[in-house]
Image: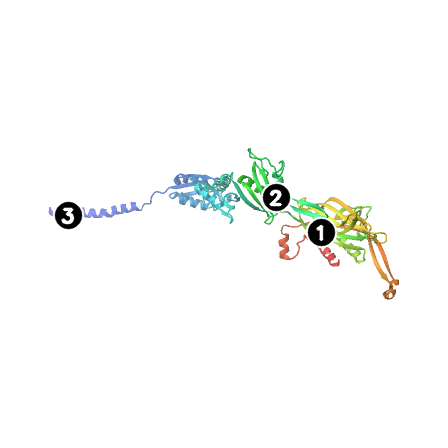
């Protein structure tokens, strides 16, 4: 009996030992089993549906652009870490996002926009602080600015860019700083520097006549004071006591604005409320713009009347030669491009039949007068019964030109005033000591349009040139005292035809930089042949 009991216990113990590995194995297999994964299975599924699945897990609302909605995905995606899944999808699909509080905007990378913003009343720091306070700021898209923090450059998704613009406009219009007590009704002082215009009026005086070119300050006063009774007697608003305002004070939107021109700095000092100053700044920006430069070249040529036909000019009918065709009588006009004309002038000059009187060149701006004036002034004594005085008489050659660029820089329209005068001599070539001088004057006034690179020809009237020559018989004329018997004076009067050639040339914007770098004037290709001819003429004369 004892043996049977011992055997039974031994068998039970063995069975227990054999069952332990099986239980351990079952427990180990259970521990190694991975947790159940959250997956998103997509098959040609719109990408915005994937983001909708993540929205609930991230506790945000996702708004996808139209470009994102057109994208499709396929595959199995692990959503166990929603933030990692979102970042991986944005990186893989080349997308960008902008978070506005609890709303996430998703765009394609090619929808990113860049913009320049100008701030007048606030700075970049103030705008950034406002965006942070309202929860709109996103550090992914920083705001960069100049040193004055008035010009901003932003590259961001459309939604964020629109919010920045709206915030800047709102702050510009309603910005107040309670610590400083600034309100839109308070007066402000601002200094505006002009870069391309003159602040003061410019006066051009020629032969006793003045031409006023208004500056920006005068233009603003003329515009804003239109309709007022007087410059110094403007009617106040809202029952204010009547007072005489200075000439620089104008009314804008019912508010007074003071404009003080500073000629030394070429600037305007403005005083007024914020809204009025903003409007005036907009006007100044439209007035202070760079003007195109125009080079005006003038040739004044005297040609013998007998040799004038060699130039291809027939004063009574149309006549053409080469590339040039001229058809005019007294003071008529034409434009030409053939530089064979200059070679003929050079040939006549070698024979003494032509003379280059003058060849000035002047640089002016679009719609700005340019004046060539070569004159002589003498004084004539006027004797009265009890008093006497000197009267000045001025004569000479004067050419006034106001050029205007037309036809998309293909031509130049010019208002031309030409005056040419000379003193008339007596029959013997001299004037009496007390005789009043006689001045011959020719005036031409016209408007002409010349194509770029062409030259305008004006002329056709005859002048008389008187030349004095002292001749003598060789050897005999050199004898002291008695030599005067063998000397004689001859007076020769020659009829000359005077021609005026005027060439306008529109300069490119990089004209001065090219000149500084290369050391020469960058002429157009089609003008090179003519320029070489002109340079040759200058050397000869």
Q: Earlier in the sequence, mark 2 or mark 3?
A: 3
Where residue 246 sits: x, y (%)? Answer: 60, 41
Q: Is residue 453 visible?
A: no
Where residue 457 sits: x, y (%)? Answer: 75, 48
Q: Earlier in the sequence, mark 1 or mark 2?
A: 2
Residue depth check, mark 2 versus mark 3: number of the one nearer the observer:
2
Q: Quadrant of the C terminus?
A: bottom right
Element class at badge 1: strand
* Residue named by callout 3: 7
* Residue named by callout 2: 217
Q: CA distance from mark 1 to mark 2?
A: 32 Å
Using the image as rendered, state which of residue 244 and residue 517 is in the foreground.
244
Where residue 207 sits: x, y (%)? Answer: 73, 48
* Residue named by callout 1: 297
Residue depth check, mark 3 versus mark 1: number of the one nearer the observer:
1
Where residue 98 sits: x, y (%)? Answer: 46, 42
**Discs 3, 1 touching: Cβ within 8 Å:** no
Using the image as rendered, state which of residue 219 and residue 233 is in the foreground.
233
Q: Is the residue 66 above or below the residue 460 in the image?
A: above
Query: How busy is the neighbourhood of tag 1: few (under 14 within 10 Å), some, or many (20 plus)?
Result: some
Q: Is residue 512 visible?
A: yes
**Discs 2, 3 touching: Cβ within 8 Å:** no
């Amino acid at each position: 009996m004892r043996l049977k009991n011992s055997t039974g216990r031994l068998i039970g113990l063995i069975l227990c030992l054999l069952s332990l590995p099986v239980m351990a194995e079952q427990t180990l297999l259970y521990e190694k089993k991975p947790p159940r994964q959250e997956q998103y299975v997509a098959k040609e599924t719109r990408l915005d549906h994937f983001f909708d699945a993540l929205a609930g897990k991230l506790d945000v609302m996702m708004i996808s652009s139209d470009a994102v909605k057109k994208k499709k995905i396929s595959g199995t995606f692990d959503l166990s870490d929603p933030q990692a899944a979102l970042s991986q999808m944005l990186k893989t699909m080349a997308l960008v996002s902008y978070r506005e509080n609890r709303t996430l905007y998703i765009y394609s990378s090619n929808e990113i926009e860049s913009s320049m913003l100008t701030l007048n009343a606030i700075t970049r720091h103030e705008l950034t602080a406002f965006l942070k306070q309202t929860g709109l700021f996103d550090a992914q898209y920083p705001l960069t600015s100049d040193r004055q923090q008035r010009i901003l450059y932003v590259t961001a998704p459309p939604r964020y860019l629109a919010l920045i613009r709206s915030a800047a406009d709102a702050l510009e219009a309603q910005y107040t700083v309670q610590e400083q007590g600034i309100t839109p009704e308070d007066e402000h002082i601002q200094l505006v520097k002009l870069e391309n215009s003159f602040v003061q009026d410019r006066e051009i005086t020629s032969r006793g006549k003045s031409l006023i070119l208004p500056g920006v300050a005068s233009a603003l006063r003329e515009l804003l004071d239109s309709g007022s009774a007087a410059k110094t007697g403007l009617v106040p608003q809202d029952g204010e006591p009547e007072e005489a305002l200075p000439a620089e004070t104008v009314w804008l939107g019912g508010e007074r604005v003071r404009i003080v021109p500073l000629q030394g700095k070429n600037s305007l000092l403005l005083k007024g409320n914020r809204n009025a100053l903003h409007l005036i700044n907009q006007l100044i920006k439209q007035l202070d713009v760079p003007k195109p430069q125009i080079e005006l070249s003038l040739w004044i040529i005297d040609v013998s009347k007998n040799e004038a036909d060699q130039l291809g000019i027939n004063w009574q009918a149309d006549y053409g030669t080469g590339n040039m065709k001229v058809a005019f009588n007294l003071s008529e006009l034409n434009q030409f491009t053939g530089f064979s004309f200059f070679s003929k002038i050079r040939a006549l000059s070698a024979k003494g039949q032509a003379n280059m009187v003058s060849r000035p060149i002047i640089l002016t701006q679009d719609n700005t007068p340019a004046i060539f004036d070569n004159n002589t002034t003498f004084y004539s004594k006027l004797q009265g019964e009890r008093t006497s005085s000197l009267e000045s008489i001025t004569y000479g050659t004067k050419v006034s030109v106001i050029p205007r660029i037309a036809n998309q820089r293909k031509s130049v329209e010019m208002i031309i005033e030409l005056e040419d005068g000379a003193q008339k001599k007596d029959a013997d070539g001299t004037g009496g000591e007390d005789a009043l001088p006689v001045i011959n004057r020719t005036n031409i006034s016209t408007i002409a349009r010349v194509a770029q690179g062409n030259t305008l020809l004006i002329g056709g009237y005859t002048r008389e040139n008187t030349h004095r020559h002292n001749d003598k018989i060789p050897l005999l004329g050199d004898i002291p005292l008695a030599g005067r018997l063998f000397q004689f004076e001859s007076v020769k009067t020659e009829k000359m035809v005077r021609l005026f050639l005027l060439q306008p040339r529109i300069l490119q914007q990089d004209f001065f930089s090219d000149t500084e770098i290369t050391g020469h004037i960058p002429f157009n290709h089609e003008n090179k042949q003519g320029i070489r001819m002109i340079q040759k003429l200058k050397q000869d004369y």
